[in-house]
Amino acid sequence: MISFWSRLFDLICPRACVVCGRRLSIQEDTICLCCLLDLPRTNCFEDFLDNDVARVFWGRIPIERAASFYYYTPQSEASRMIYQLKYHDHPEIGTTLGRIFARELLPQLFFQGMDAIIPVPLAKKRQRQRGYNQSAAIAQGISEETGLPLITHAIERISFSQSQTTKQRWDRNENVEQAFRLKDAQAVSGRHILLVDDIITTGATLCACAKELLQAPDVQVSVLSIGFTKS
């Protein structure tokens, strides 16, 4: 039930869809129903090991499952969600998208057997500049829907030279090589970890992060992101 106060607040301070800018109804959150239905979904449900996202990691790291919410195209209307999340101080967008995607994946048993969620960490300097980790915001939404605990201390990013955004495939690999360090192997040992990022392009960041996690004994890794840039 939607409370009187929620309706009053929505009347006084109307909210807008992050994609189209249209006023949201009281039942909608962050993105309107029309834009949500129009998202170019990856539809990874049929096979979580053989889809566009999973193929990025074939022959690079062993993964159990892979999925992304929608195909991300820079400068598209749908890209506004990620842009607002990362650069305009709106971590709540990540949390909402994480919840929405998790609700779609739950009936597909994507999370079955998983033990915990790890958001890809930001370098400390980068996180101070932004004020939050956008991947952690997404992971929080997934955790709220699935009940899976978040682990934020097991791995850290020890270097950040430049953004991945404008780099080519091989430059991206070099940019994140040895960028992560496993701090607490015991926290992930013997567990199936879901590694969460905002966008997958070449998979270089997730590969570098997963390789560190896989140094711990008996670790399984799955990957998930909101956006996927199809080459």
Image: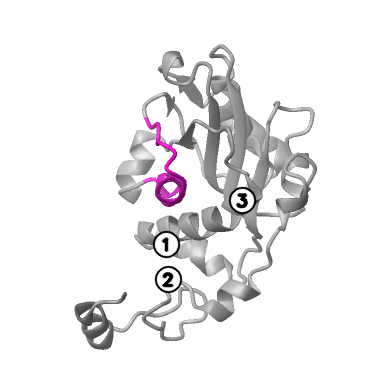
Depth order, front residue of 200/27: 27
Name the chief secondary structure element in magenta. helix
Depth order, front residue of 45/164: 45
Whichever of labels 3 and 2 marks the residue nearer the N terminus, that label is 2
Residue carrying label 2: 30
Amino acid type at circle 1 is Ile
Residue 146 drawn at (x, y percent): 47, 46
Amino acid type at circle 2 is Thr
Residue 86 drawn at (x, y percent): 44, 56
Which residue is depicted at the point 45% across and 77% down? 17
Q: Indicate yes or no whether the magenta region holds residue 155.
A: no
Residue carrying label 3: 166
Q: Which residues are magenta?
A: 133-152
Give the spatial CA distance, label 2 vs label 1: 6 Å
Position above or below: 103 against 11 = above
**Mark 2: secondary structure:** loop
CB-based contact (under 8 Å), mark 2 and mark 1: yes
